[in-house]
Image (tube, coloured by chain):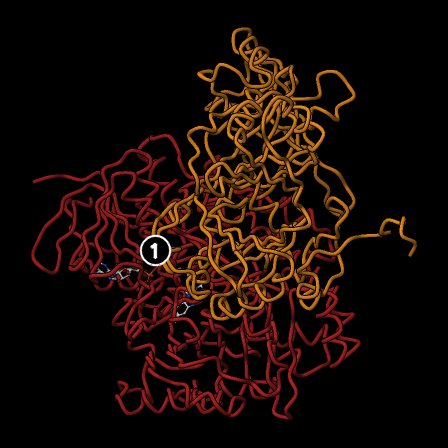
Chain colours: A orange, B red
Amino acid sequence: MSAFEVEQGKLRTPFWPKTRAFDRLSESHDWKGYASADAYLEGGLEYFAIRNSTGVFDLSPMTKYRISGPDSLAFLDRLVTRDMKKIRPGRVAYAVWCDDQGQVIDDGTIFHLRDGEYRVCSQERHLAWFTAAAIGFDVTIDEETTRVAALAVQGPTSFSVMQNLGLDGIENLKMFGLMHFDFHGEELMVSRTGFTGDLGYELWIAPGKAEALWDALFEAGKFLGIRPIGTYALEMARIEAGYLAPYLEFIPAEETVRTGRSRSPFELGLDWLVDFSKPVFNGRRALADEQRRGSTWRLVKLDIEGNKEAHHSYVYARKGGRMINIGFITSAMWSPVCKQNIALGSVKTPHGKPGDTLWVEIYYQREMHWSRVMAKATVVDGPFWDPPRRRATPPAPA
Amino acid sequence: MKTYDAIVVGAGHNGLANAAFLAKAGLDVVCIEKNDYIGGATVSRNLYKDWYYSNCSYVCSLLRPEIFRALELHKHGLQVTPYGGSCTFMENGDYYASYPDHEVTYREMARHSKHDADAYVRYSADVMRQCRFIRDFLLTTPPDPTSLKPKDLRNLAKIGGKFFEMGEDRMYETIRFWTMSVAEYLDEYFESDVIKASLSGSGIIGTALGIHSPGTAYVLLHHYMGDVDGNVGAWGYARGGMGAVADALCGAFQGYGGELRAGSGVDQIIVKNGKVRGVALENGDEISSRIVVSGMDVKRTFLKCMDRSDLDEEFYNRVRHFKIRGSSGKLNIALDGLPTFPALPENSPVMDGDLHFIDSMERMERAYDDWKEGTWSKDPYIDMTIPSFTDPTMAPPGKHFMSCFIQYCPPLVEGREWTDEERDQFGETCIEQIARFSPDFKDLILHVEVRTPKEIENEAGLTEGNIFHGELTMDQLLFNRPIPGYAQYRGPVAGLYMCGSSTHPGGGVMAAPAANAAREILSDLKRSNVVPENFGDD
Ligand SMILES: Cc1cc2nc3c(=O)[nH]c(=O)nc-3n(C[C@H](O)[C@H](O)[C@H](O)COP(=O)(O)OP(=O)(O)OC[C@H]3O[C@@H](n4cnc5c(N)ncnc54)[C@H](O)[C@@H]3O)c2cc1C
C-alpha cells in the first residue's frame, strides 16, 4: 500500500474480532464505510433479546465530534433548536439542527461530558456545517469517530449486566444521564440512552480497550441472555419506539435535490425540540414563520387494522365520500410486542391529528398473487412501545 | 343487594378474557375464582425459593393475536418470546433436531433421511392448508347445521365455501385428515422412525388416544394452528411464565372497571323459573345477576354447580357422557444449573425449545398401552422445555426451571385413587428417562413438583385433569362442542353461558372461546360488539 492510498472495501470496527465469532450469516450492509451486520444468527431472536434479555449492538461507525472551548455551550445553543443551557454536565440531549430555511439537517444526541465539554453523535458527517456555524465562537470541533468505540446494550436485563460489570452507582443513573468509570485504566463512559425504547445503556471507550470491554460485557451477561444483535433487530425496536431514521422519515436537508423533499422539526413531530425562548438559533426565523403559517407535512404514527404490513403504502383520508391521497408510509412492521400493525408516515396537514382515522392502501403477495386492502388506521400519540422499566430508577433486575 | 350485569365463574384465562370483553363493552362484571390465585391452567407459581413455575400450560402459540391486540395485553405486561429449536434424543446416542433456519433443518433431516427432508416440503404445505381452513373459524361461533337463521346459514355457507374452494382432491384429503390417525398420516410422507416419532408427539399431547387411534391427526393440527407473530405453528414463552397471560387479562379486565373475587368458589348457579338469577358461593355469599358465564369445564358446570332438576334429561345425560378423560401429568423442576446432554454440541441452539426422549413409533404406542391398562407410561412421552433458557425472570441467574409435560398419566391408577407413593414413582419414571440422556441432570435437581391428573383436577379444577376441558375428537368439535345444539355458548337455561375450553374451538391457551362467547352475550343484550374479527390469513 502506498502512503497515499486509502483503504479499499469495507472498514471493520474495533469490535470486529469479537463479533465475527458470532457471525453465522455473513450478511452486512454499509454504514458510513463500515460493514455493519444485518444479523448474526437470526434477526427475530436478536429482536427478542432486546425485549426479553439483552442485545448488544456495535454502534462504533456513528459519527462523533468532540466540542470544547469556552464558547462550546453558546455554539451548540445557536446550532440546535432546543435549549442547551438546560442540559447540565452528565446529561444527554436529543436534538436537531436546521438550515436557514428551518429544514432538518440531521438529528443526533449531544452528551454533556464535563462542564463545557460535549460530544455530538449523528448519522451524517457535519464538520463543514459545524465549522461554518462556529465562526465567531471560541470553540474546538474535533472529529473523533474512529477514536471512540461504542456499544448499545439494550434490554430488560441490561441493568443487571451493568451491575455485574462492576459499575458502582449505575443504579442511580437516570434516563438521558451519563457517568464515567475506569475500565482497565481507560475511561469508560456509560450513558442511559438508546434507540430501542427499552431499558438500556450505551458504552463508549477507546478502541484499544474495545475487545476487553466486549469480553467483560459478555462474561457479565453470561446468565442474562446477552447476545449480539444486528441492524434488522434494532430497526424493529426503533419503529416500535417511534424514533425517526434518516433517509426514511426525513432526508438530511443538505442532500435533497428536489424541492419540498426536506422536513422541518414541526413536520417530524419534534415541536418539543424547538425553543423560541432562545433569541437566536439557526433556522429560527423560518421556523417562526412556519409556526405562524402552518406546516405542510405531519409525521404520523399509525395503528393499522389487520396484520398486513403497510410497506411502501399510500395514505388516504376520506373527504366527502371520496378517498384522497394525503401521503405515504415511511416505516412499517408488525410489532411482536404490541401485537399491532404499526407504521410511521408523512401526510399533508391538516390531516393526521392524533385520533384521526386514515386509510392505508396495502399491497401484499401470497404465493405469487398480489392482493390489495384499504386498511383503516388510527393516528396515535406517543410511542407504540414504552414499558415502565425503560424509565424506572433504579431499574428492576430483570 | 347489588345486582351485576354479569357474573363470570372461574378466573382461568377464558373466564378472564370473557370478563374483560364484557367489561370493555360497559357491563358491570364480577369474576369469581375458587382459588386465592388466578389463572386456572394458565398460571405461574412460586413454590420454591426464587423459582417461578408455569405449573400447567408452559408454552404459548394459540392465544389469538386479535384478542391480545384488542385488550392491549402488552400494556398489562404480557410478552411472548418465540423459540426455534426442538430435539429428540435417540437410544443409539444420536439425536434428531430442528432449528429456526429452514436450510439447517433440511440438512439435519437429510442426515436421517434425504427422502424425508424433501417430503417435508409437501407435508408442511398440506398441514398448512388444513391450518388455513380451521384458523378462519377460530374467532367465529360455530353455525348450527339444523338452524335456518340467516346468521347460521351464512356461516355454514362460509365453511362450505372454504371447503369447496380447496378442489375435489383436497376435499377428500381434508375429510380423511380430520378422522385419521397421526401415525397413518405421517406414514404417507415419511420413512424415518425418529422423524415420525418426533412429529407424532403433537398428535397425542393432552389426548387419551394413541398415535394409531383415529382422530389424532386433528390433534396434531390443534398444535400447529396457532402462531407467534404470523409464523403459523411456532410456539413461544410468555415472559414470567404462563401466569403472565392470566395476569395481563386480569389487568385489562380490572382496567375496564371489572371486579375480581378470588378465594371462594361457586357452589351453585342459582336458577329461578328457568332463568339464571346469580350464584351462591362456597362461603355462603350470594351474588345476583341475570347473566352467569361459566369458565369451568362443562362437566363441572352442570354436574357440580347446578341443581339436577334445573336441567333436562337428555342434556344432562349428554354432559355425563362428554369425553374428558385425563391422560397427562406434569413435572416442574428447579435446577441448580443447566443440565448437559452429551449427545448435543455445546451451546446448541435447540436447548431453547422442546426436547423429547422417544425415538420410535413403537415406543410411542407402548406408552399409550400403559395408560389403557390404568397406569402411567413406564417409558413416557415427555415434552421437556427449559423456559429459563430464554426467560430470565423464572429462575435466578445461572439456575433453571425445567417443565416436563408427560403423556400418559391416568386420572386413577388401575381404577383407584393415586397414592402419594405412586405419584412419586411416576415422577421418578420421568426423571430416570431424562437422566439416561443427561448424566448430570439428577444432581442438579433442587425441587420437584409432581402433578398427576389428580393434582391438576384438585388445584386447577379441570375434570379428570383433561387439559383441553374435553377431548378434541370430531364428535366433540365445532358444532358438536361441547354438546350438539349447545355450541353457540348458550346454556340450557336463559341467562347461562359457557366460555371455557369445553366450547369451540377448544382447549389450549387461546382465549377464543371466551371471545366468541362474549360476542354472543353482547348480541343477546343488543350491545355493540367489542370482540375483534379474525385477521384473516389470505
Ligand atoms: C398440565 C397442562 C399443560 C398444558 N400445556 C399447555 C400448553 O403448553 N399450551 C397451551 O396452549 N395449553 C396447554 N394446556 C391447556 C390449557 O392450559 C388449558 O386448556 C386452558 O388453560 C384452559 O383454560 P380455561 O380458562 O378454559 O379453563 P381453566 O384454566 O381450567 O380455568 C377454570 C377456572 O375456574 C376455576 N374454578 C373451577 N371451579 C370453580 C368454581 N366452582 N368456582 C369458581 N371458580 C372455579 C378454576 O380454579 C380455574 O381458575 C395445558 C394444560 C395442562 C393441565
Q: Indicate the position of residue A317 as horizontal and vertical percent values.
A: 59, 18
Q: Quadrant of residue A331?
A: top right
**Vertical relation: B482 (above or below) B452:** above
Q: In the figure, is residue A233 to the left or right of B222?
A: right
Q: Quadrant of residue B523?
A: top left
Q: Nearer the viewer, residue B93 or B336?
A: B336
Q: Position of residue B251 (x, y in %)?
A: 31, 47
In the rendered structure, the answer to whether residue B52 lies left or right of residue A314 reads: left
| Residue A269 in the image, given as x and y percentages of width and height | 53, 25
Query: Residue A80: horizontal and vertical position, in percent?
Result: 55, 26
**Badge count:** 1
Hey, what amino acid is under mark 1?
Ala
Q: Is residue B291 above or below residue A256?
A: below
Quarter placement of the C terminus of chain A: bottom left
State the residue in front, B214 or B464: B464
Tell me if residue B439 can be seen: yes
Q: Secondary structure at mark 1?
A: helix
The yes-or-no answer for disc 1 within 8 Å of ligand 1 is no
Q: Which residue is mark 1?
A: B246
Q: Rate crowding at label 1 as few (under 14), some (14 to 19) or many (20 or more) other CA atoms within 10 Å.
A: many
